[in-house]
Structures are given as structure tokens and as C-alpha cells.
Amino acid sequence: MIKRSGVPAAFAGALLVGAVTVAGCGSDGGDTTFSGYERTPTPQVGDLTLPAVAADGTEIELAMKASDGKVMLVYFGYTNCPDICPTTLSDVRQALGDLGDDASKVELTMVSIDPKVDTPEILGSYVRSFVPDATAVSTLDDARLRAAAEGFGADYGKEEVDGKLQPFHTTSLYAVDPEGDLVLSWTFGTKPADLAADLRILLERVA
Amino acid sequence: MLTTLKARRLLIGSGLALASLVGAACGSDSATTAGSDGTGAEATTGGSAAESAEGIEITGAWARTSPSSVDTGAAYLTIKGGAEDDTLLSASVDASVAGMAQIHEMVPVSGTGSESTMDRGSDSSRAMGSDNSTDSSAADGAMVMQEVKGGIEIPAGETVELAPGGYHVMLMELAEPLKEGAMFDLTLTFENAGEKTVNVEVRTEAP
């Protein structure tokens, strides 16, 4: 595992100043209790909205904030992604399995960074094959998509690989609380059990 | 502990935390599922072992279940080098499984080639990554998939993982979705050891 705990003292101090304090942060060694990492200042994404399709097929303007008492997970990816995306979504599914009943307090949203291919139907079917009540965001309005991604610190685009344009994207998974605060980010490869442990802490905070 | 060339490369390049997944990807022997639903011959043994005179050993071959909305998938496995250095050149599957198989790798996106990729969000997260003692200027960076050129070196006696986030065998034009419990044959071609066929188990989670 990458050591998110190796945070320099100055940085840890900055975290303490932030609205959300990390339990254990700033203690000797700088260990945090999270496997994911927090950013300073905490990005505010709650004012961002994107057109989305909920699990029941309803078209909604989805605000990037969790419902009361819940935590929203946001992932930027695409369906023709055979490795990173299914691995992450599978890890989320396992983490939610670990959470048991509390899984219903976690709202997964997948945002397609390849919306021309990922129609709302395709993306919805894809992400719900991992997490049945997930919300799918697929918009052809690139300005809004870009703005939303930037709010999360996520990058995406297409890069020419062997003469073909290949989608790329930031591989992190993000957690947003009901205030719209991007409270935690996980790098690719975080173990499901660690995701679940972090989610338990986040759910306690929003309860 | 296994030596994982890819993990080393990725840690240098991106700071992704592969260790856990890499660990999880080896040593599978969950041979409970053997249902062949027409995706391949009922071959040798579940997930374990094609051994050659040269001693190249392939274990833990698995592929993740693929959502019905896509026609791509990925297979993973572990290769232990034999008495002499070798190179994994290519992979293939029967047309009844997929139209094409290629060896791919995930690499950090090289630059800022795409338009408007420079956003404050990822800048700050990258800055945070660089604060981290470990490495990872691109801890929160973007990844892109590319075909491996020139094959994967398999040094004598060393173990190389094809694992999520690193190398994978990408299956394109899947004849049908990869369903849990299915098995199919995957043929790997090595420069010296020649063709080795392993039986791949389709699983929802990494073994």
C-alpha cells in the first residue's frame, strides 16, 4: 500500500485547521485512520450538478452531495475499460458487502468520461451490474462534465495510443458528504476492507 | 515476497498501490467452479498450472465477469520464469470466447496532451502526492491503457504478475459476456517456451 500516513507535519497541521479533522492525524508518525486521503482545503462539490439517470430510470439533475445521513461515492470512468474500472467497481461492491445494512447509506454514482459511447442506458446497465442501486451520469455537455471533474480534481480525456484515441481518466474514487464536501479520496487499488472501514467512519460522521 | 516488475514500474511511475491486489491475484486454487458453459474446452485444472520443460509456470489464471453492456474483458495470471529468461509475446483465445486478445498495460498519462486538462483540482492533489515521502507525483493522476510492445520480460526464476492496474490480457469482441464460473482456455506464446495454454476461471472477484 502507498503510505498515505507519511504526511509531513506541516501538511498534517493544515489538515487540523480544516473543517474536518482527521482522527489520529497529527499524532506521532502522522498516522491517520483512513486508507483514503483528505485534501486541504476540502473541495466543495455540492453545487455541481449533472444530468443523471437514477436506478429506477428517473432522469434527474444530480447534485454532487449525499442525501442526509449518507455518503456519496463518485467515480469517473467508462464502460469499455476492462481493467481499472471493473476492478474499482468490484472493490466497491465488496466493500458494500462488508458494510451489510449500512450499504444502503452509500450512494454510488458513476460518471462516464466517454459519454458518446456510454449512453445513459449502457452506463446504467454497466454500473448496476456491480451495484444495483447506482446512479449513472452520462452527459454530452462537455463543459459541465469538465467542470464537475475539475471540482473533484479528476482529469480525463483521450490520448492517442497506437494511432487510436484511448480514453484516460483519473483512477481515484471519491466520497462526498451531505454538505457537498469531498471528504475522502481513494487511489486505485485500495482494498475493499479498507474502503469499508473508511466508509464506516464517514457514515458515523454523517449519522 | 514476489518480485513484480510491473508493480515496480508502476510505483515509480504513479505511486499506485498495487501490492494488495497483486497479492490477492496469486495462489488461487478455488476450484469449486468448473461449469463450462460453452466458452471453452474442459481443459486441465482450474486456474492452476501449465508447466513446461523449461519450467515456466502459469498459475492463478482468472478473468473478471463482464457486464452484459460491454464486449471487453480482462484476464489475469501469474507467470514464474523458468531456467532461462523468456518473453511473453502474445495471448490468444478461441473465437468462441473473444475476437481478439492482446496484452495491455496501464500507464500514467504522459502529459497534458488533452485540451484543458490543467485544472486546479488535480494540481493540488498532485502537489499533495509529491508531499508524500513515498513517490507519486501522479498519485491522483490519470491512467491510460496501451498494448504492450515487445512483450513482457519473464526473467529466469522471477515471478511476473498480470494483475489489476498493471498488465492484463485484454479480451476484445467477447462472443458473450464472461459469466461467473465459466472456464476458457487462454494460450500464451513465449519467445523461448513457445505456446502454453492455461484454463482461465471467470470470477466476480479476484481470487
Image (cartoon, coloured by chain):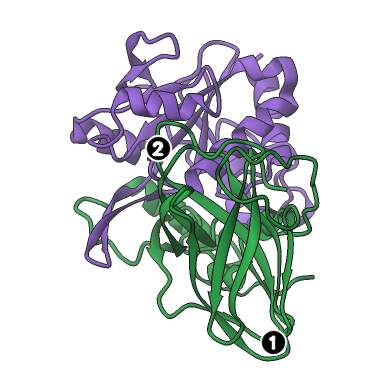
Chain colours: A purple, B green
Q: Is residue B86 above or below residue B160?
A: below
Label 2 Cα neighbours within 10 Å, binned few <14 / some 14-19 / many ≥20 = many
Q: Position of residue B111 (x, y in %)?
A: 30, 65
Which residue occupies the foreground of this view, B127 or B49?
B49
- Give amino acid for label 1: Ala
Residue at mark 2 = B70
Using the rendered image of the protein, determine whether residue A1 is visible from the camera's viewpoint.
Answer: no
Q: Residue at x 43, y 30 (%)?
A: A110
Decide if residue A57 is in sight here. yes
Q: Amino acid at mark 2?
A: Val
The residue lying furthest to the bottom in this view is B84
Instruction: Provide the chain ID for the residue under circle 2.
Output: B
The residue identified by callout 1 is B156
Q: Are marks 2 and 1 in contact (CB under 8 Å)?
A: no
Crowding around mark 1 (Cα neighbors within 10 Å: few <14, some 14 to 19, many 20+) is: some
Residue at 54%, 62% in the rendered image:
B166
Q: Residue at x 49, y 21 (%)?
A: A134
Q: Secondary structure at mark 2?
A: loop
Toward which corner of the image does residue A99 lie, by quadrant?
top right
